[in-house]
Structure formats: C-alpha cells, structure tokens
Image: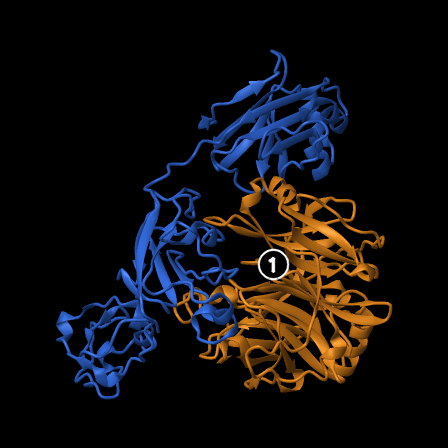
Chain colours: A orange, B blue
C-alpha cells in the first residue's frame, strides 16, 4: 500500500501527473495561476500540491483557490515549536485568543514553513486570514494583494441559504477537507443534492473538468446507511495498487472508497473497515513513512491520537454488525490534537491543545 | 481633524516628549504620534522602511504594553508620515472595550529616520470606547415548546433574537438532571455548529448514537433523557451574540420526560382541512415543517397522497404559508 499525501512525495506526484494527465513535468503549473489578488470568503481546509501551490477550500465562496505563495525558502529539517500560538496570532491580528479559529494547517514542502488557515473573529466582521509560521517562530501574514492564483467553482455547492435536514447551514460544509493527488484536487463536503455527502475531483490546472460523486456509507454503530453526513477528513492512498480514499466520518466510521468508482454523476457505496469510537469527531488524518514503513495517523476530538497500520487495510472485511471494530489501531498517548501534517523526513507537526492554549509541537516519527 | 479621542491614560510622557493618542477620524481609527521633530518626520519620509522595522519602532498591542522580555508581537498595520505626525492604522478594526498598549522606541525611530529622535521608550495605553450596544439578545423560543417530551427526542431548536457568535454554543448549553448534575455527552457537537444562515436558530442534536436502539453508544451510555425524570436545558447568560454582547439573561427549559415515541406518523391518521387561500396563515411546527419545506412552493395540505389537491393556485401561499395539519387521534407528537 502506498500513501500519497504529505511531504516527500513531490517526485511521485510529478510522475503521477505525467502518467495520469499527460501534463509535461517541464510545463509550470504555477504559470497557469494568471489571476491576481484573490478574494477569499473563507479559509477552511488547506493543502499543498505540485510546485508548492497552496490549495484553499472556500466553503462560503463555494470555490477552491490555487495560490502561488511564492515561498522559496529552504527548510532546515529542524523541529517547530511554539507555545501559545493562538495568543500570538491574536496579538498579531489585534484581538484576543478566544477570537481566533485555526481551521487547518499545512506545511510548505520546500521551506517547511507552517501555513495556517485562520478566521479572525467569531461574530460580525469575522475575516479569513492566511498566516505562516517559520521554524524560528516568526508569524507573518501571507498577503493576498498581488498574489497570483486560479480558482475552481464548486459547481454543486449548497446554496447560501440551504439547510440540510433543517440542521443548519449546509454551506459551511461545502468543503470539509481537500487534498491533491494524481493531477486532481480532491474535495469532500456537502452538495446541493438530496444525497448531500459528496466527493469532487477537479482537474488541475483548473479548467472545465469537474467531477462529483454522491457518497453513501453504512454506519455500523448507528445501524443505518448514511448519505447526508459528510466526510470530515480523508487521505488519498492505495489499497492493493488501486487508488483509494480513506475517509473518516463523525462518530467514527473509517471508510474506504475505490477511486475508480468516484466518477462524475455517480453514487458510490463505501466500504466501512473500522469503527474508531462513538461520540467522537475525527479531526485530521495523515500518512507518513518511517524506516521504509507507511503509517497512518488519525487525530480525534475525544480520543487520543490513533496509529493505523495500512498493511491491514487490503484484507479488511466490510463491517456489517454493531460491535465489530474492524481494522485496529494503536493509541498514541497524545490528545487534543486538532491538526497535523508532515513537517519533514523526521518530524510531524501538530496543532495541539494540552489545556493551556494552543501550541505547535513537533513529534519525531520514529517515536510514535 | 479628530472627531473623538478616548479617555487616554498617558504614561511616562515628559513635556517635550512625543504625544501618542488614539484618534477616531474619517475614514477610520488610528494611533497618532504627535510632537515628533520635523527633522525626524522628514527622515522617515525619505527612508524605505519595512513593516517589521516600523513595528519595532512603534508597536501597537491588543493588550497592555508587554514587558522587555515579553515577545508578544505588535499587531499588523500600516505606517504613514502625515503632515506633522506619524500614524498607525491597524490591519483590522481595533477591538472596542479592550485595553490597548503602544510602545514608541525613540532610538529605533532615530535609526530609521537617520536623524536624532532622542532616546528612551514612550508608552501609552488606551481603550477604544464601546459602540452603542443596542438591545441585548434573548432566547426567544426553544422547540419543541411542549414541556413533556419523549425520551427519544432527537433535537431541539433554539431561537434567538439576533445573530450569535460562532463557536460558543456547546460551551453555553447544558443538559442538567433533577439533582443539578450535568448529563455528559448528551449532545452531538459539530465543529461548524448547526446554525441557520442568519445564525439566529441553532439546531441542537441529542447524540443520535445514544437515541438509536441497540447501537454502540446507546448500549454503552444509554439515552441522555430518561422517562419519568425531569431535566433542564440550561442556557448560560454568558453566551455572546455576534456583536460580542452576552445574552440579556439565561434561559432554562424544563423537560418532563415520558416514554419513547416510536410511532411512525401515518398519513391516514391525519385529517386535512383546507382553508380558504385568503385565510392562509404562517404555520409553525418544526417537527413537520421539514416535509413542508421540501416543496416550498406547494400548499402544505397537498403533501399527502390522500389529501385534497388545491383546486386553484394559492397565489398568496409563500414558503411560510401553510394550512393546519391535525392528528385525528392516533398520531402523536414526538421524535421524527
């Protein structure tokens, strides 16, 4: 099984791009970012892609931005650490820590700077802000004025006034997570359809190619099929050589979707391979490699960090009965982890709440 | 021209020292440093100064001025030399009612200007005045309005009189039993919170896994509500609205819990009385309105296959105009 998300995969990505899309590696993706000064309504999920282009999910604006952050730094390979990152961000943005929401974290593969998608304010006048934290501990705003970008519209986004099941604004769930793999930006979230849970495949560079598939899963502990609950976080990977999306849902089924079935206009039933615990939200999922072995980490709202052996996934059975837990995990005794990403070959960087505000921490991969 | 200046608390400012003040003037608010030597201002105009250097010379903080070993960063903003003053404008609006600090380092300013600006640190603190708060926000209703609810009640709707802040709902709403103990893990907490687009109606789900029979959370934790017992939904007065103001007062809703309602609504149990179109009135029943709003342009009494069809278009029937639906006896209110 090969995991295709995170630092150190640039070469594989470039090769995959060439094979899957026919894109010539010597043609600059960055050169396709011809628009200037993006106006982003909200910054949710973020992820780096080819040529260190930063993809930003904008649920409110129903779009995905590709940004040229023009960060040419070279990473040192050192760990990153910052106590009170929310307090420091609040100071920089001229407010208090309780007015800061850090929505996602992504590490620039080249510079190893940590990019944070932030919302300043929780009420009237709240605004999205893109920030960068360097290894030396400096926080700077990544200015959008003059920045080159391109944008893809989420064609099936919920309308601004659309609720789903009267539960609330479906619009805020337009993009719950995104990633880049094999020449496509992959976007999970809710759509404007009756079966609202949706997965989009948007070819990059952005053009007219937009594919959307509605998703259904069997939530074993709820004993029901679910079509409305969105994927909360996912990881593009491979199972038995087949490109696969490993997706985690609230309360907490882990589901595998074969990418070959995620075709435009289709409806796909995922294979539930694990139940990771009730009353819990999965917050982030990443793959990493240590000593030549692939591993998967899942952070949670109520449970400790979970390490899943990807070698167990190819033979995993489809769960059908309550009580079945499926693919097991190893609990890593770290809790309160909101977001994470590969920092470099040796470290994973975490946004963690250990009871005294948020902090950025680096954990050695070989110590997990 | 300054329209207003806050009640400043200048500190350690000599007669000949620069004066720092918070100023509200069209088109916005700013922090101004007056009484700087003209030579220094002229030097600053001629120099190319990056943002970090400016902030090292004149730092504005969303809190008290930090001590010398405190690495709290100054806030983002722009700097400009105007006629006879140095001006800072924040990247974002200053927080009203929050004490702010300003630190002016004259030596650094002198280096940036290439002139002698003197020496020492001048500090200043100010609090931008609160804006007119307006009427306090209140909880206007919690649905279902009935005090008696089945133990498998799935959700509550909390209506408020004004838009609320994001991210504070679950910390300010508790389910409390008759002994005053908080029922843990009663609600499903969603990171986005389940607000309507106006952010005046919150949908609060009891954990569906605890409601549905014989599934994991139900077996492990049981239902959050228990028949024969009484609970309170307690809403804290500290819950803040979108303006940052707390509620006018707290709110409590008592739930007297009865046996679970597991009767599926059946269309044949309902009588449909068609009103005259001219007498249409708003229909307000969240438990059934999800059926109705599926067809926002239809008359509500048309939803059942056996019901009378509208004999004529209901020209006045908008999304909120619905006719009465009443159970004929066997139908009961309950969880959907």
B111 and B263: which is toward the camera: B263
Taking the spot 60% from the left edge, 78% from the top edge, the residue there is: A324
Question: In this view of the protein, can residue B161 be seen by the observer?
Answer: no
The residue most toward the top is B15
Determine the chain carrying the residue at label 1: A
B268 vs A181, nearest the viewer: B268
Measured as percent of width and height from the top left, residue A234 is found at: 64, 71
The part of the image, by quadrant, that contains residue B226 is bottom left
Residue A10 in the image, given as x and y percentages of width and height: 80, 69
In the displayed orientation, state which residue is furthest to the bottom: B306
SS for dot 1:
loop
Residue A98: x %, y % from top left? 54, 45
Quadrant in the rendering for residue A299? bottom right
Q: Is residue B106 above or below residue A165?
A: above
Image-quadrant location for residue A68? bottom right
> In this image, B208 relative to B289: left or right?
right
Q: Which residue is mark 1?
A: A38
């Amino acid at each position: 099984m090969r995991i295709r998300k995170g630092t150190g995969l640039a070469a594989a990505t470039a090769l995959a791009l060439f094979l899957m899309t026919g894109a010539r590696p010597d043609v600059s993706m960055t050169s396709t970012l011809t628009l200037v000064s993006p106006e982003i309504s909200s910054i949710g999920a973020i992820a780096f892609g080819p040529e260190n282009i930063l993809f930003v999910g904008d649920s409110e604006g129903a779009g995905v931005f590709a940004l040229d952050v023009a960060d040419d730094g070279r990473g040192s390979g050192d760990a990153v650490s910052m106590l009170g990152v929310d307090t420091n961000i609040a100071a920089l943005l001229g407010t208090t820590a309780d007015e800061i929401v850090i929505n996602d974290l992504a590490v620039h593969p080249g510079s190893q700077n940590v990019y944070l998608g932030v919302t300043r304010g929780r009420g009237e006048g709240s605004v999205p802000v893109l920030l960068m934290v360097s290894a030396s501990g400096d926080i700077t705003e990544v200015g959008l004025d003059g920045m080159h970008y391109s944008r893809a519209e989420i064609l099936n986004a919920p309308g601004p006034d659309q609720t789903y099941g009267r539960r609330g604004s479906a619009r805020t769930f337009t993009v719950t997570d995104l990633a880049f793999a094999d020449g496509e930006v992959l976007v999970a979230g809710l759509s404007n359809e009756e079966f609202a849970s949706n997965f989009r495949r948007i070819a990059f560079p952005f053009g007219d190619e937009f594919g959307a598939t509605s998703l259904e899963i069997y939530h074993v502990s709820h004993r029901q099929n679910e079509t409305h609950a969105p994927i909360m976080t996912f990881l593009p990977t491979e199972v038995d050589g087949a490109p696969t999306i490993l997706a985690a849902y609230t309360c907490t089924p882990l589901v595998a979707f074969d990418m070959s079935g995620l075709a435009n206009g289709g409806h796909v039933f995922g294979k539930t391979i694990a139940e990771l615990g009730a009353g819990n939200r999965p917050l982030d999922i990443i793959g990493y490699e240590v000593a030549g072995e692939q591993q998967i980490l899942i952070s949670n709202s109520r449970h400790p960090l979970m390490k899943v052996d990807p070698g167990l996934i190819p033979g995993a059975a489809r769960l059908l009965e309550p009580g079945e837990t499926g693919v097991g995990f190893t609990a890593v005794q770290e809790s309160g982890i909101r977001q994470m990403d590969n920092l470099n070959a040796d470290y994973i960087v975490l946004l963690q709440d250990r009871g005294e505000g948020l902090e950025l921490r680096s954990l050695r991969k070989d110590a997990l | 021209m300054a329209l207003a200046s806050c009640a400043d608390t200048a500190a350690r400012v000599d007669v000949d020292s620069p004066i720092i003040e918070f100023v509200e003037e069209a088109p916005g608010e700013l922090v101004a440093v007056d009484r700087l030597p003209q030579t220094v201002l002229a030097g600053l105009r001629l120099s190319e100064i990056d943002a970090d250097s400016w902030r090292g010379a004149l730092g504005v903080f969303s809190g008290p001025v930090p001590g010398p070993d405190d690495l709290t960063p100054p806030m983002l903003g722009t700097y400009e030399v105007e006629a006879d003053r140095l001006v800072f404008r924040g990247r974002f609006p200053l927080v009203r009612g929050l004490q702010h600090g300003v630190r002016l380092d004259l030596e650094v300013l002198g280096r940036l200007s290439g002139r002698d600006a003197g020496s020492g640190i001048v500090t200043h603190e100010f609090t931008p005045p609160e804006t007119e708060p307006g009427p306090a926000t209140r909880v206007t209703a919690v649905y279902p309005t009935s005090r008696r609810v089945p133990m498998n009640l799935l959700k509550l709707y909390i209506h408020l009189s004004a838009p609320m802040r994001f991210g504070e709902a679950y910390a300010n709403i508790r389910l409390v039993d008759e002994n005053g103990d908080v029922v843990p893990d009663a609600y499903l907490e969603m990171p986005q919170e389940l607000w309507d687009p106006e952010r005046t109606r919150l949908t609060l789900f009891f954990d569906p896994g605890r409601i549905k029979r014989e599934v994991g959370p139900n077996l492990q934790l049981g239902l959050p509500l228990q028949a024969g017992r009484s609970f309170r939904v307690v809403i804290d007065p500290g819950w803040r609205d979108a303006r940052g103001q707390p509620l006018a007062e707290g709110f409590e809703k008592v739930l007297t819990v009865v046996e679970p309602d597991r009767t599926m609504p059946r269309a044949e149990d309902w009588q449909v009385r068609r009103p005259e179109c001219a007498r249409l009135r708003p229909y307000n029943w969240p438990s059934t309105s999800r059926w109705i709003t599926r067809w926002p342009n239809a008359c509500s009494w048309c939803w059942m296959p056996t019901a009378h069809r509208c004999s004529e278009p209901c020209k006045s029937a908008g999304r909120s105009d619905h006719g009465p639906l009443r159970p004929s006896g066997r139908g009961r209110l309950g969880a959907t």
